Image: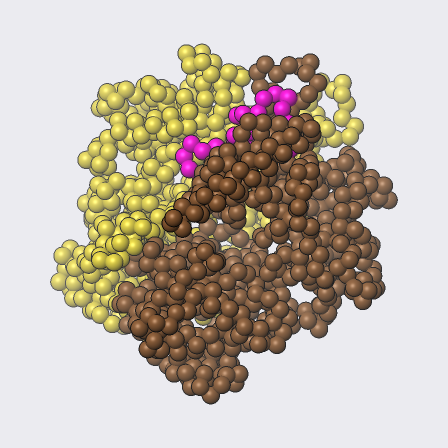
Chain colours: A yellow, B brown
Amino acid sequence: MSSITAQKESFLMYNDVIQKRLEALRSAMKAEGIDYYLFVTADFHSSEYVCDHFKAREYFSGFNGSNGDLLVWKDGAALWTDGRYFLQASEQLEGTGVDLMKMGMKGVPTVEEFLEKNMLPGETLGFDGRCIPLGRGKGFEKICEKVEKKACADANNPEKSRVILCDIAEKVWTDRPELPAEKAWLLTKDNTGESREERIARVRRAMREKNADVLVISSLDDIAWLLLLRGGDIEFNPVCLSYVVVTEDSLTLYLNKTILSADVIEELTADGIEIRSYNHIYSHLERMKNTPIEEPTVMIDPKRVSFTLYKAIKTAGERVKILEDTCPIILMKACKTPEEVEFERQAHIKDGVAVTKLLYRLHQLREDPSFKAGEKKVTELEVSDILLNLRKEQKGFIDQSFAPIIATAEHGAIIHYEPDEKSNAVIKKDAFLLMDTGGQYFEGTTDITRTFVMGEPTEEMVKLFTAVLVGNLRLAAAIFPEGTTGQNLDVLARQPLWSIGADYRHGTGHGVGFLLNVHEGPQNINLKGAGGKMTESFREGMITSDEPGVYLDGDFGIRLENMMVCLETSKLKDNAGKSMAFEGKSKEYADDYGPFFGFETLTMVPFDKRSIDPAYMSAQDIRLLNEYHEKVYNTVSPFLTEEEKNWLREETAAI
Amino acid sequence: MSSITAQKESFLMYNDVIQKRLEALRSAMKAEGIDYYLFVTADFHSSEYVCDHFKAREYFSGFNGSNGDLLVWKDGAALWTDGRYFLQASEQLEGTGVDLMKMGMKGVPTVEEFLEKNMLPGETLGFDGRCIPLGRGKGFEKICEKVEKKACADANNPEKSRVILCDIAEKVWTDRPELPAEKAWLLTKDNTGESREERIARVRRAMREKNADVLVISSLDDIAWLLLLRGGDIEFNPVCLSYVVVTEDSLTLYLNKTILSADVIEELTADGIEIRSYNHIYSHLERMKNTPIEEPTVMIDPKRVSFTLYKAIKTAGERVKILEDTCPIILMKACKTPEEVEFERQAHIKDGVAVTKLLYRLHQLREDPSFKAGEKKVTELEVSDILLNLRKEQKGFIDQSFAPIIATAEHGAIIHYEPDEKSNAVIKKDAFLLMDTGGQYFEGTTDITRTFVMGEPTEEMVKLFTAVLVGNLRLAAAIFPEGTTGQNLDVLARQPLWSIGADYRHGTGHGVGFLLNVHEGPQNINLKGAGGKMTESFREGMITSDEPGVYLDGDFGIRLENMMVCLETSKLKDNAGKSMAFEGKSKEYADDYGPFFGFETLTMVPFDKRSIDPAYMSAQDIRLLNEYHEKVYNTVSPFLTEEEKNWLREETAAI
C-alpha cells in the first residue's frame, strides 16, 4: 500500500469522528435555538497565534490550516479558507460532509453573503462574540436585520432573526484543552528606560487628549508594554491572556491570578494596579453605569476589541458614550526608548553570533565531500535544531520568536513554508537554503533571514541573489524627512528586481516588538500601505524588518532580511561608523526641511558571498556591502572560535 | 512721495468703491431675504482657471489672489485665503471693512465653522450653487439644520434656517463681464486615433457596468475629450463652457450655440448629438421624471458636479436614483491613444526647438560683455515674450498652456511666481533663471521647466542643480510593475536631495492632457498620493511631468521638468534607442510578475551643463544624462541654424 493511500485511509477514518462531532454539535445548537453557528480562527484578543483551546474549527472540521471559518447548520457545513490552503483543505475535508469554500475565487460568496442569502426570517446565527472583532460582529447583526426584512416575514412571528452569543464548543468538546496559564514576570525601568508609572501617565495623557474617561485594552502586546509585564500564554509571544481597563485614577488588570507570584502581585499593587479575574471584565464593563463619572466616554479600538466586550459596554446603557479609535499604545510601543534600542543591539549581537556559527557549520557541510557525494544527509528540521541549540548557548535566550522557516531548494519558493515531520526534506547540494528564524532574548526580539548556497550557485541564482541584496542595502541606506512612510520607501528595495522583470508578492518590511511580538504595527514597508490606506510614517525608535526576496516556483527562493532601527540623522552612524549628522549647508537645508531620519542596521550576520556578483552592483552598493560586512566582522568575531573567526574574515572581506 | 505711499493711497480710494459695492450688495441681500452670502472662487465647472465673469469675490472685496472665499452679512464681511496670500490680502483689504481670515492658522475657524457659530435660527445663507461642488453644498445645508436646532429656536417661527441658491452679483454688479463665447472647433479621428462615436460607445459601456442610465458630465476637459471638441472659453485651456448628458440612446450637449459654426453643428448632429442652450441643463434635469426609464439611475461625479445641478436632479423626485461616482472619462482621457502619443512626440520636438533656441539666446546673453558689465538689461517679461515668439514660429502653435513663470534669482524660490508689470525684474548675472512654461499645439500640450545659470554658478548652486537633475533622471528611468503608483515612485526623484538635507514642498509630477489642460488627473507623483488616498496606478499612455526642484528663500530656485509617457516595457526604448523589452530569463519572470512599465521622455531640451558636476553623479546617472543629451541633439538639431547647432553639440556632448 502506498503511503499516500494509507494516509488517505486514516483521513477517512478520522472523518467519521468529525461527522460524529458535528452531529453532537447540531444537537447542542438545536437545544440553544441556534440555526447557524460560526467558528472563526481567533482567540479573545485578535492574537496572531492561537493556543489549542481556541482550535474548535479544527476540532469540528479536521482542517488545521492557519486561516479558516467554519459554518455549521442543520443539514450542512462549509469551511472558508484562502488560496494557500485549497489543496490541504480539500484533502482534510474529504468525507466529513463539510464543503470547501475557496475564498476569493469567482462566484464563491463570503460567509456574510452566504448567510444573507440562505438564512430565513426567524433563523438565528450563533458565534462566540469574544473571538470576533466588534466590526464584524456588528456586520452579522445587520445581516440578521436584513434577513428579517425579507419578503414573507411574518410580522406576528415572535421569533426574530438575531445573533446569539454563545461558546457552543464548551458544551460538546469534552476534552477541550484548558486556557494556558504560564507564569508571568515583570520587566523594570532598567530594561525599558521607562517605568510602569511613566507609561501609564502617558496613556492617561493620550486619553485626556481624546476626552476619553475609560480606555479598554484587549490586545496582549499593548498590555505587556504598558505594565512591563511578560508571560508565556501565546506561543512565541511573551504575553499573558489579560485585559486592562484604565481610568484617570484607576487601572484594573484582568487575568488568571494563578500566573502571578506574590512578588509580582506586590509590585503591580504598589503601582496602584487592581488585579481581578480574567472573566470579570464583562461584568465590570456592564456595571459601568454605576461609575461616578457623569457621562463616561469609553475608548475602544474597533480592530482589537471583541464584539462581546463591546456588547458588555453597551449594556451599561445610553449614559455611556463609546469612542472607537486606534489604541494610543500602538504608536507609543512602536517607538522604542533609547534604552530598548541599546538592548536590541545587544540581542542582535547574540543572535548574530548564533546565526553566524550556523552559517559556518553549513559552510563546512557544503565543502564536505560526503555531502557533495550525497552520502551525508542533513534535514531541514536538523538544521532548525542546530540553530535552536546555538541560540540557547546565548545568555538571555528565552525562546524562538516564531516557527522557523528552514527551506531547501523549491521549499524556499513557498513563502510561508515551515518544515514539519511530513514535509521535512534533506538539504540539497548546490541549492539555496532559505532560513527565516528569530529569537526572544531578555534584551529583545530578533528576526533574520539568510539564504545560503549549499555548493555552487548557477549564474541565474547569483544574478537574482545580488538583486535582492542590492535592494536590501539600498533601502537600509535611505535618508528621508519626517512624514515619509514605508509606502514611499518600498520601491528602493524592489527596483533592482523590477529592472530585471522580477518581484515578490509580500511586503518589504514589518514592525518588530521589543521582547514582544515579532509582527507589530503601526508602520510597515509595503507598496500598498496598510490595505490601501497610508501607514504611519517612520519615527525615531521604530524597529522594522527589511526583507526583499524572489521566488521561482518549484525551483528556489531567496530572501535576505535584516532588522533596522529608525533614528534621526543627528544620532545615526553608517556601518563604517561615520556620523550621518548633516553639516555645513546641508545642516541649514535640513533645519528647514527636516528633521531627517535614517536606519541603523541591527542584524549582524554576513551575506553569503558565493552568490554575490559585483558586476550587478553600483560602486555605492559595493561600498555599502563592504562596510556592513566589516561591521559584522568587528561586532561578531570576538565571540567566535579561531576557526569560525578565520572563515568570517574571509566571508566579510571587501569585494 | 514714495511709490509705496502712492500705491497705498490709491488702494484707500479704491476701497471706498468696495464699501459702496458692499452696501449695494447688502440691500440686495435684504430684498432676497439672505442674511449671509458667500462668494467662492470657481466657475460652474470646477475649472482651475476662471474667467472675469466669475470674479465676483474680487469685485466685492478688492482681493485678487487665486484663492479666496468672501462671506458678507448685515454688519460685517470676511475673506478667507491661504498662506500664499496673507500679505497681499491684508494690503488689499485695508479700509474695505472686510476682515482677513488666515486659513490654516491656529484659532481661525473655517467658513463652515464660522457660519455654524454665528448664524442664528431662522437666518439664511445664500450662494450661487452653480459654483459650489455638491459635497460642499450639502455641508452648508447640514449647517443650516444644526443652526435650526440651536437652543431657543422658536418652533412656531415659520422662517427656518436654510440655504438660498441665488447669483446675487447679477443684481448689483452692473458692468459684469459676459460669459466668454469663443469659437469652438473639432478634432477628428486623425488627431486622436479614436472617433467621437467610439468614445461615446466606451462611455456607455462604462455606464452599463455601473448600471447607470444617465451620466451628467460637467467638467470641461472631459466633455472636450468625449466629443473631440475644443474651444477658447478658459484661458490656456482649449475648452468650451458646456455640459453633457448621456443616456444609452441620446447625447445632449448644452452650450452657447453661437460658438458653433454650421459645419461643427452638422458634424456633431451627424453623430447623433443634440445641441441645446447652455442654461437648459437645469430644466432638462428637473424634467428627468418624465423619462421613459422606470427608475433612472443618474451618475454624477461629486467632485465635479455643482450643488445646483445636483438639486435639479433631486427635483425630479424619489423615482430618480443618484449614483455618486468618479466620472469614467477621467481615466480614459488620461490614457492617451498611440496616435495621441505620437502627436505629443511631435509637439515636443517643436517645443524643444523653441526652448532650445531660447537657451541659445540666453547663452549669448550670459557671454555678452555688456550683460556682464550690467549695461545690457533684459527683464523677465522680455524673456517671456522672446519665448512666446519662438513658440509662435512653430507651425501648429495655438497658445501658451499656462501663464509663464520666468524667475530670476530669488524670484525662482517663490514656487508660484509669475512676473507681471509690478514684479518684473531684470535678469541677474551669475544667478539662476528658472523658466516654467508650456505650449498648446495642434499636436498636443507641453510643460517644461529649465533652470539656466546666467554666468558662473557657485559650488552650492552646482551641487543642488546636480542633485535635482539626478532625481529627474532616476525617476524617468524607473521600471515598475502594473499597480505601481506615483506615491511609490516619488522617492526616486527626492532621494538625491534628501541625502543632502534638502527637499521641495510640491509634488514631483502631475498628469498632462492631450491638447487640453496642463493639469489633469487621475495619476500624479506625490509622496502623499491624492490627499492621503492612493492615486490611480500608472497605465499605458499616461503622460506625467517629472519636476523635482529645490528652493532657497531669498536666494534662488531650481526646477527641472520633463514630460514622460508611460509605456509597457515591450514598447519602450531608452534614450539610446535600445529596446527595454525583457529578454531571456527576465522575460520569464516578467510573464509572472508583469506587465512592467517605464517612461519615455517626451521633452527635448538640454540641461544647462555649466551647473552639472559629475562628481555628484553615479556612473549610471552619467550614462542616463549623456544618452538623453545625445537624443536631444539628434532630434532637435535638424531644425536649428548652424550657429545654434554648434552650440547644442557642445551643450549635449558627453560628460
| Location of residue A356 (image quadrant) | bottom left
| Location of residue B267 (image quadrant) | bottom right
Name the residue rendered at 50%, 71% in the picture.
Answer: B387
Name the residue rendered at 51%, 48% in the picture.
Answer: B65
Residue extending farthest to the bottom is B642
Count of picture labels: 0
x, y percent for residue B270: 83, 64
x, y percent for residue A237: 35, 39
Q: Can the viewer see residue B432 in this picture?
A: yes
Q: Can the viewer see residue B89 in this picture?
A: no
Vertical comparison of A507 with B462: above or below: above
Name the residue rendered at 35%, 48% in the picture.
Answer: A482
Residue extending farthest to the front is B1
x, y percent for residue A633: 19, 61
Vertical comparison of A653 with B86: above or below: below
Q: Is residue A198 magenta?
A: no
- Magenta segment: B105-126
Q: Nearer the viewer, residue B122 or A590?
A: B122
Vertical comparison of B394 with A527: above or below: below
